[in-house]
Image (cartoon, helix red, strand yellow):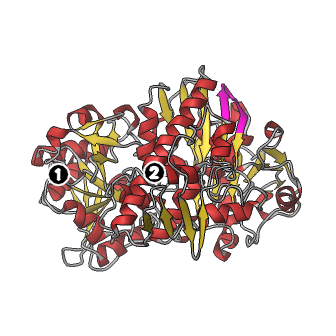
Amino acid sequence: MPTIGVNLGHDGGAALAQPGGVHVIEAERQLGLRHVCGGNTRFAAEAAGWVARLHALADAPVTAVAVADWYTPACAILPEGLVELVSEDITWSRPGDALASSVLRPVKAEGWPLAEGPAGPVPVVAVRHHYAHAALAYFTSGADRALTVALDGTGNYAECGMVCLGEGGRLTPVLSFDNRTGPRFGLVYEALARRIHGGQFDTGKLLGLAATGEVDPEVLPVLRAMLAGERGRRRMPDLFESLSGSVLSGSALRYEDTWFPYDEEAGGYLDGLLADATDDDVVHSYGGIFPDEIRTAHGRRIAVGSSPGDPVCRNLAATLQAAVEQDLVRFVTGLHARHPDYPTLCYAGGCALNITANTRLAESGCFTRVSVPTCCDDSGIALGAALAVASAEDRPYAPGTRPGPLLAFAGPELTGRGVRRAGHTRRTFASDAALVGHVARMLASEQCVAWLQGGMETGPRALGHRSLLVSPHWTGARRHVSQTVKGREWFRPVAPLCPAEVAGDWFTGPLDHTDTMLFAARVRPDRTEELSEVRHIDGTARLQTLHAAEHPLLHALCHAVGEHTGLPVLVNTSANGGGRPILNSLEDALDLLDTTPLDAVVLADERTVVTADEPAGADRTDGTDEEGSR
């Protein structure tokens, strides 16, 4: 039977899980505000409408509404029982021996608008934040036995991660972590992102910037001590490498006018001071602010800037990325040693968006597969909550199967398809081959198109359904689409699209993991010059491989462009303007067409190309099958 999930925190929204599939509504795409949470007044006003839409999509009466436990106090639509649970029950949401009994809990929700179904009130169940992450990762993977890890930054303040064991239709929590002892992978990453880029959600920018810097060996142990202090490392030596042999004595961190020297007993800088602090204070101290200055054990003082153009900031980004990768691989390798009979790693939480670290995990040799859902961050929490509460027979992805692109494109269809705007020409083609041939010629002639197709992607990456495409055969293609059309920073990488069967001719790395752009491939050394427009500074590429059965039009488009240019590869980046969520309306796409150098909007499902390069006219249908040219 269907289950609805709700997330009232940042990246909030609602989702439906039922045997026939899933549907995900992300609030930021509905409201046009990135990372929006339940404290937003429009969110509160429209959330009941999203839930009603999911009821209408359900194949049968909804049996429960699952709500993720983290919320902002400013949220105006909270069920009473959730507030009582989170604020009053000390056994809930905290690491400890009661873990298995504190991940799901019925709550009082009389009169809660989001619990009202077509036939009356629906039972409400609270789901612990990281258990929702873990449920999303495991129950959408198709694995029948998996080690499941959820790691993020702030988390629910009391907790920053959880480890579960998935077997068949069961997901059993076995371990959880708090920010006092670590791992604080996401939290410290957020702090440096705030420092350099201005916000905690700019961690993706920080990952891109990391490739432009050099690892500083004197700073590396300092940052590793910030990720997890020695006290926590000694407690779980199989998961965390001791720093006792590192050179840390004499090192210190300065926050404003106060220096905090390395505390040998606590094994960190703030660890001893915050041992008895509130969860909020711990999160703010590690994740809200980054040190103003670092003093290494050798006495070198490094003033921390706040600009991506500052070489110190670039080197710090590179060094922090190296620290995270080093400790994350040790952490997951240790978990594998504890639970060696689980061949698949299912991984979620905000930390799972770090594609370079993901590649290290995929290439560690511990697992036959590393499965990361496209909406692994909090945008997937609503669906994870629904899957956690649903019974085994009511979940859509049976163990032992590969769900393929079903989750990746479980968002809403494009809205406003019937919109017409003066000054645009709409050209419709009689066949898929004609459409593909026409768009291929546009791309080969150094034009840029918005390709809109099917259901919207879940999560923060465009995977060919809401994408801007350009061919990388010409110098300046990346700058044109990323900086000129979208207004993004110069160091942000773009992502190549490539048919899976020829990807090995152009890229190396875990190519069996690259269908959703969550793992980093490497450009082959002999292809460096040809792929200079898709290659990141460090030689990696956020590759998405395409299979003909799953992406027939895009797969054919890559090959068609390759016939013109010699490169069956396309540059792909999300269809949106700078600072805006990925678009999901034709109106927004036409705004891009009118206000940027974008050359066309392609409505692939309708075989229609909209351009603004001709005088306004009536719709035209092109009857030619093969070429579709006039």
Task: Provide residue 58's location: percent of width, then percent of height.
Answer: 67, 47
Under mark 2, the amino acid is Leu
Magenta-drawn segment = 164-175
Displayed quadrant of residue 486: bottom left
User: In this figure, which residue is indicated by the disc labeled 1?
Assistant: 624
In this image, 548 relative to 127: left or right? left
Task: Provide residue 141's location: percent of width, then percent of height.
Answer: 55, 34
Residue 220, label in figure: 2
Name the residue rendered at 80%, 59% in the picture.
116
Answer above or below: position of 352 versus 258: above
Q: Is residue 1 visible?
A: no
In this image, 385 relative to 493: left or right? right
Under mark 1, the amino acid is Thr
Displayed quadrant of residue 37: bottom right
Mark 1 and mark 2 in contact? Answer it, CB < 8 Å.
Answer: no
Q: Is residue 177 visible?
A: yes
Determine the secondary structure under disc 2. Answer: helix
